[in-house]
Amino acid sequence: MRTGVVSANNGPHGNYSPTTDKCAGCHRTHTATQGNLLKGNTIADLCFSCHGSGGPGANTNVVDGRLEPSGMPLNGGGFVNFQGSPTTSRHTYDGSQHPAWGSDTPWSSYSGCQGCHGPWYQQWPGAPTFYPGPGNQPGQMAGAGNVQMPVTCVSCHDAHGARSYRLLTNRVMADVIEYQDPTLPGYVQVVSNEVGGLNPDQTGYVPNYTERRYRDGITSWCASCHYLYQQRQSDPAVPFDAADGLGAQIRYRHSITVTLSSQGLTTSLPLQQPSGYSVTQQPTDKVACITCHYAHGSNVRMIGYAANVAPTNDSALLRMDNRGVCEDCHKK
């Protein structure tokens, strides 16, 4: 049984008072078992103690990808199970090193991973120095991307509250430094079409965890790590090794942030909706990363031609079996 269910904009994640009791939900001043005075053995353990199966507090069960107690599927999918079956691909959350496919930037840019991890880190106070420029991390191919990144829950979400949809961080490299100042490099705010406003800071905001209601910013936010997946043919060429045996070379990628109406296409998949519509597809709606992919984990199946496709060789967080996302738009 779940007791004391709370929501992100009325729970432990922000809106603190001068005598708040919320700190004790996650921190122990003298008996913490991990850094930053956090309880639990890992950040995931702490987050899943509320956002897990049967955990008290949050009704957003990200382990199983469902909203409790209704059982409706969450927008982001699930990390372990989703819609009653085990996931076949997922974003990592345990802090271990994994390749961030498509992660690299031209040296002239402040966007992407190198905004924090390049030689220009001294351009603003507090930026990290512990990662060198491209080509120097274990497993990283010089100039080819695939930076090894330790990802946890707080790499994407700000536990203390954020101006963005779903407490998404406003930063380039989320486990390092928070960019709440729009004038600093790497600031990206994700906004939604939810009732009462665009983000949890606005009066009357009502979260909706089961309908896809992105308005703006989600593709740029994903590209903070997966920079090369947003690369256009007009951008400076950056070689990329897709682990397909062809080595580092220039790759061609599907267009994003384009309107389907301009291509004469329609889809049942979620689109970024800048006009603020949440149900009916509009001419201004755009293809975004979340059109094809879940953020947390997917349980779809890959067989035949779709199986074992580099670089991930799994279901790649896709929303439909095999390459159903392709057929849903292109209807070949």
Image (cartoon, helix red, strand yellow):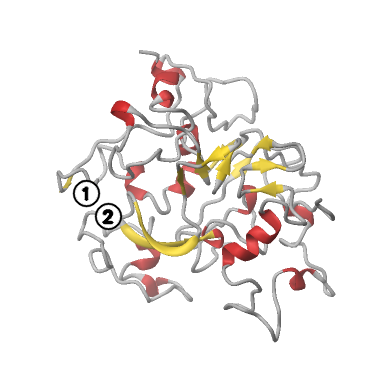
Read off the residue under disc 2: 145
N-terminal-most mark, 2 or 1: 2
Residue at x 62% of width, y 45% of height = 64
Label 2's element?
A: loop
Most foreground residue, 278 or 77: 77
Give the x, y percent position of residue 309.
29, 37
Q: Quadrant of the C terminus?
A: top left
Is 151 situated above or below 190? Answer: below
Residue at x 66% of width, y 53% of height = 52
Image quadrant in which you'd find residue 282: top right
Residue at x 79% of width, y 53% of height = 6
Question: Going by the image, does 38 lie left or right of 238?
Answer: right
Which residue appears farthest toward the front when viewing the image?
Answer: 85
Most foreground residue, 169 or 108: 169
Question: Going by the image, does 295 lie left or right of 122?
Answer: right
Q: CA distance from mark 2 to mark 1?
A: 7 Å
Amino acid carrying mark 2 in the image: Gly
> Badges 2 and 1: C-beta atoms under 8 Å apart?
yes
Question: Going by the image, does 305 lie left or right of 13?
Answer: left
Would you say residue 161 is visible in this rendering? no
Most foreground residue, 123 or 135: 135
The dot on residue 241 is: 1
